[in-house]
Image (spheres, helix red, strand yellow):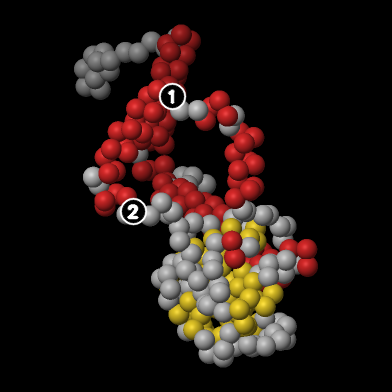
Amino acid sequence: MNEDTFEEIFSLRLTLMNVFVVATIGALFIIFITTYIIAFTPLREFIPGYASSQLKRDATELALKSDSLTIALKKNDLYIQSIKKVLTGDLEYATFNKDSIVAATSLLVSEDDLKPSKADLKLRDEVEREDKYNLFEKAKPKVSTVLFPPVKGLITEKFNPKEKHYAVDVALARNTPIKAILSGRVIFADWTPNTGNVVIIRHNNGFISVYKHAASMTVAQNDVIRTGEVIALAGSTGQESTGVHLHFELWKDGYPIDPSIFIEFE
């Protein structure tokens, strides 16, 4: 009411329904505003106990890095165990030669499958005619991997898995250059009590070559070397050495194989 004229200016009639409707609308409005602030505005970071977006990103990045480090650590552990087995020779023996390859192939392919079809015969004739006039193609090597002889000398002890001698011993003159059989990376180059100076090289095609009893080494760990590069000089180091020679081991996919099958030492 107007205080001077006592005229009624505004009137409000309260009922139970009016109070309920106004209170409900107000509560819904407050809930909507609060939800909007928490979900779509940076003000939610000021709420105690609520993590910020930067903290979530950092936590996610740290979780990914920890997973990567865990995987890398497992790989390094397996790698170190493999190196220990290479040095001690405590591994199962697997033979790789032409007979085993032929036997394995005969189990998978029958003779009928090997017979050429008419289309194959026609294609062979065309290729044969083209090869007669293409000397460059005929000069290309058919073997993708060629192993370079590490040394040339007399084999004093051959590969003998029954006696756990997973290597070939080659007699040499002192300080004879020892060369890498294939390009790769040096994963071990150090002195050991039993085998003296040892160089281990990992190659890209699953091969691992091991050179023991060297007088000195010309490479270091993590060095990248090429085929035929000098990596050490022959000697007689280590407790197990009986004279100047090279103890050469060749491994394929974790199994020792006879190096003389692929390399001519003499």
Which residue, as the protein is rendered here, is positioned at the far right?
A: 163
For the N terminus, give its image quadrant: top left
- Residue 80 location (% of width, % of height): 63, 66
- 77 relative position to 31: left or right: right
Q: Taking 107 as reference, is 219 above or below it?
A: below
Label 1: which residue? 117
State the count of labels. 2
Q: Image quarter for residue 214? A: bottom right
- Residue 150 location (% of width, % of height): 51, 74
Picture residue at 72% right of the left edge, 69% below the top:
165
Label 2: which residue? 140
- 24 relative position to 189: left or right: left
Picture residue at 72% right of the left edge, 61% below the top:
91
Q: Look at the image and tell me whether residue 55 can be seen.
A: no
* Element at label 1: loop
Picture residue at 48% right of the left edge, 64% below the top:
147
Picture residue at 41% right of the left edge, 51% below the top:
142
Task: Tell me the crowding category of disc 1: few under 14, some 14 to 19, or many 20 or more residues within 10 angstroms, Cα based.
Answer: few
Task: Tell me the crowding category of disc 2: few under 14, some 14 to 19, or many 20 or more residues within 10 angstroms, Cα based.
Answer: few
* Element at label 2: loop
What kind of residue is marked 2?
Answer: Lys
Q: Taking 171 as reference, is 84 above or below it?
A: above
* Disc 2 and disc 1 in contact, CB within 8 angstroms: no
The residue lying toward the viewer, choosing from 239 and 126, is: 126
- Residue 202 location (% of width, % of height): 52, 65
Which residue, as the protein is rendered here, is positioned at the far bottom?
A: 174
The residue lying toward the viewer, choosing from 180 and 3, is: 180
- 253 relative position to 21: left or right: right
Closer to the chain start, of discs 2 and 1, is 1
Q: Look at the image and tell me whether residue 22 can be seen.
A: yes
Q: Taking 90 as reference, is 222 above or below it?
A: below
For the C terminus, give its image quadrant: bottom right
